Image (spheres, rainbow, N blue to C red):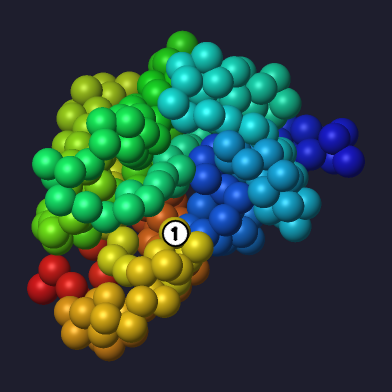
Amino acid sequence: MAKAKRSSARAGRPVVLVTGAGSGIGRATSMRLANDGFSVACADVDAAGAKRTAEKLPASLALAIDVREPESCESVVAQIYKHYGRLDAVVAAAGVNAIIKTRGDLMEIAEFRRIIDINLTGVYLTARAAARAMIKAKQPGRMVFLGSIASKVSTPGSAVYSASKAGVLNLGRTLAVEWAPFKIAVNIVGPGVIETPMTAASRANPAKAAEFISRIPLGRYGQPEEIASVISFLLSADSAYMTGSYVTIDGGWLA
């Protein structure tokens, strides 16, 4: 199997690293990109989850990653280059929500740091490791960061989550400008409420669910595959003139 995977990469199949590939949007994106002709390096802190996703895809690779750790991100990129000999794209989809939504002055600092470390620092460390390798190889690339509608608006109890996602938006915009001379494009997507394990608890709360639906003009939650389709576009030649863009996929919430 490994030989077949390497041979596919040598034949010109583009290679993409997807973090958070074990579930939710990351998993749906991995499957969509594989169908669109990518070799997918499925990376997740849950190594078993990454493996479950990779096993369903052709020319795939399962990797364990802790996006909070620079060494882990560098190691994953090195493993991709060793296995495939290239890296063309990155989808930084690893993320978490607040375990307990609470007022900003009542939040424990450990929880604040945990969310910032994964949602914001983790995106930066993933992108930095990939960009360093791409620049060294003099290879163009495309990246998509997972922001949120919370990159633009907030709700009570979500101060740290909103801060992390606003950071992702402006991090992506800045890196898009800095890396444009190296032909590395960076765009950001802003999903609304999507049916994933991360939103399951909120969607199961009748009051919260009613609030969500009342704010979505299309009257329903989004599906992970609907986010994956936009990400696929942003990694394709059809988006060649896009970098630093923020694309909202929220059923009309921000409208």
Q: Quadrant of residue 153?
A: bottom left
Which residue is nearer to you in this view: 140 or 34? Answer: 34
Task: Please indicate whether residue 33 sits to the left or right of residue 147 in the image.
Answer: right
- Residue 237: % across, % down: 41, 50
- Furthest toward the top, the residue is 136
Q: Which residue is drawn at the image coordinates 25% and 47% (left, top)?
A: 161
- Classify residue 177 by image quadrant: top left
From the image, which quarter does the C terminus lie in? bottom left
Residue 213 screen position, x and y as percent: 26, 83
Q: Position of residue 118 (x, y in %)?
A: 39, 35
Q: Relative to 156, is 65 on the left or the right?
A: right
Say above or below: 225 vs 7. Answer: below
Q: What is the quadrant of the N terminus in the image?
A: top right
Q: Is residue 172 left or right of residue 139?
A: left
Q: Residue 230: where, in percent of width, then height?
A: 38, 61
Neighbours of disc 1 within 10 Å: few (<14), some (14-19), many (20+): some
Q: Nearest the camera: 182 or 209?
A: 209
Q: Residue at x 22, y 23 (%)?
A: 178
Tag count: 1
The kind of residue tagged 1 is Met
At x 29% / y 44%, what residue is drawn? 187
* Extreme-front residue of the structure: 106
Find numbered disc 1 in the image and state the secondary structure of the residue it sits on: helix
Which residue is identified by label 1? 198
Q: Nearer the viewer, residue 105 or 83?
A: 105
Q: Tell me what residue is drawn at x 51 percent, y 34 percent.
A: 88
Q: Is residue 65 in sight in this rendering?
A: yes
